[in-house]
Amino acid sequence: MKPFDSYIICTSPRSGSTLLCRMLREIGHAGFPDSHFHEPSLEKWLGYHRLNADDFDKSEDVLRAIFDAAHQTGCAGSGIFGLRLQRRSFDFFMQQLKVLHPSCDGDKARVEREFGRTLFIHLTRQSKLDQAISVVKATQTGLWHKAPDGTELERNGAAQEPVYDATAISAEMAVFVKADEDWKLWFAAQDIKPLRISYDDLSADPYAQLSRIVAALGLAYEPADKTVVPVAKLSDNVSREWADRFRSEGRDLTC
């Protein structure tokens, strides 16, 4: 019997989670991890899963339908559910689980009542400065992800040149520092010992980190090609120049 029925990638933006999710999906029998509960909004969740609230009699029925649809999508017929969960939607997500499972004692118990035995994966990026710069650049340029061949995978705005903004970088750094602290506090409070994956390790050898996760899940896997990954890095000379400038200005690197 496999040790887990599901896994949750506990993370924050620009941590390498898109790469990791795509690699896990490409295995074919490790679920379809994605942000199935991305925005903290029932209306958004209904839209993600193509559901209409008017088709249900009670609010609990709406919520039940959303989670059932997300579970089906996240399993993709594999028998194991994958989810990427960002801190910005964490509180709302847990509130909805409490509605569905009011008799459960604690967040972990509610997660496992809903999704079965769950492996929690903590994916973090050590350099909060680099992480913040990545978000600011993506927000300004509209480009969030691209493929190894240079084609765009995700864009949410018109193309424009990035402009150095120390205030925005500092603000994002503070968000990411707090997100990591909040994850760690939650793991401790719930007596969870997550599998820890760093952005640096994932970037240096993505298939080694993928193999760690697959082994922890008790799944068989042998990558056919260890040389090509599905998502390219967006860090460039501009990113490095911004980081050097930020440091040279003597700004707070710990937030």
Image (spheres, rainbow, N blue to C red):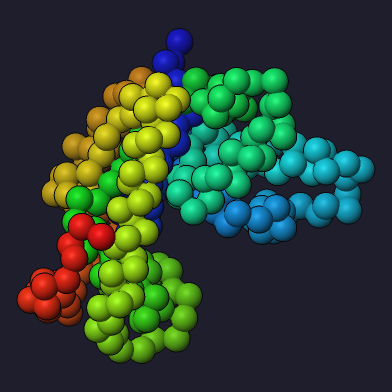
- Residue 12 visible in the picture: yes
Q: Vertical placement of 93 versus 40: above or below? A: above
Question: Which residue is drawn at the image coordinates 42% and 16% (left, top)?
Answer: 3
Question: Which residue is drawn at the image coordinates 34% and 36% (left, top)?
Answer: 184
Which image quadrant for residue 109? top right
Q: Position of residue 67 (x, y in %)?
A: 67, 39
Q: Position of residue 187 (x, y in %)?
A: 39, 30
Q: Residue furthest top?
A: 1
Instruction: Judge by depth and name the residue closer to the eye, 130 or 148.
Output: 130
Q: Is residue 92 left or right of residue 235?
A: right
Q: Position of residue 224 (x, y in %)?
A: 25, 40
Instruction: Judge by depth and name the residue closer to the eye, 168 or 2.
Output: 168
Q: Is residue 230 left or right of residue 116?
A: left
Q: Vertical placement of 197 versus 157: above or below? A: above
Q: Vertical placement of 27 versus 43: above or below? A: above
Quarter of the image that includes the N terminus: top left
Instruction: Judge by depth and name the residue closer to the eye, 132 or 19.
Output: 132
